[in-house]
Image (spheres, rainbow, N blue to C red):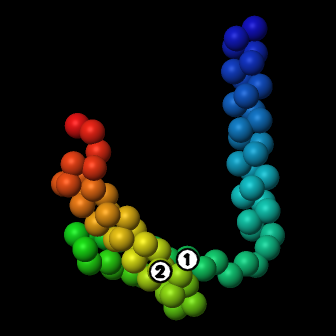
Amino acid sequence: MDAALFAAGLALILMGILLMALALASTRARVRGGGVILIGPFPIIFGDRSLAPLLVAAALAAILILVMASLLAGAGGWAA
């Protein structure tokens, strides 16, 4: 029974991959994307220009959270 369940699961996964590939091939969508890489306190922002303000805000929020966490940890704000 375990081999049958394994085979059924594998068949469902392969059918899902095939259906996703067919769906992607049949549509013409414009893909937009971007990202932020934090190296120390310096953000490197890349991607679509329309996403740049959102990525800058995300980078600033991440920097603020990291600075606050390091200040709290250094001030003994968290139990050791």
Q: What secondary structure is found at the residue carrying circle 1?
A: loop
The residue sitting at 43% across, 72% down in the picture is: 61
Residue 55, percent across and down? 48, 79
Q: Is 80 situated above or below 61? A: above
Residue topped by disc 2: 57
Residue depth check, mark 2 versus mark 1: number of the one nearer the observer: 2
User: For residue 77, which numbered disc appears in the image?
Assistant: none
Residue 16, percent across and down? 76, 45
Q: In which quadrant is the C terminus drawn? A: top left
Q: In which quadrant is the N terminus drawn? A: top right
Relative to 66, 32 lies left or right: right
Relative to 18, 44 lies left or right: left
Number of numbered labels in the structure image = 2
The residue sitting at 77% across, 42% down in the picture is: 15
Q: Amino acid at mark 1?
A: Gly
Q: Is residue 55 visible?
A: yes
Which of these two is toward me, 40 or 16? 40
Q: Residues within 10 Å of mark 1 (few under 14, many from 20)?
A: few
The residue sitting at 71% across, 48% down in the picture is: 17
Q: Is 78 situated above or below 48? A: above
- Tag 1 or tag 2, which sits nearer the N-term? 1
User: For residue 33, which numbered disc appears in the image?
Assistant: 1
Q: State the CA–CA distance, disc 2 to disc 1.
A: 15 Å
The residue sitting at 75% across, 33% down in the picture is: 11
Give residue 74's quadrant in the image: bottom left
Q: Residues within 10 Å of mark 2 (few under 14, many from 20)?
A: few
Q: Amino acid at mark 2?
A: Ala
Give residue 59's quadrant in the image: bottom left
Q: What secondary structure is found at the residue carrying circle 2?
A: helix
Residue 60, percent across and down? 39, 77
Which of these two is toward me, 61 or 25? 61
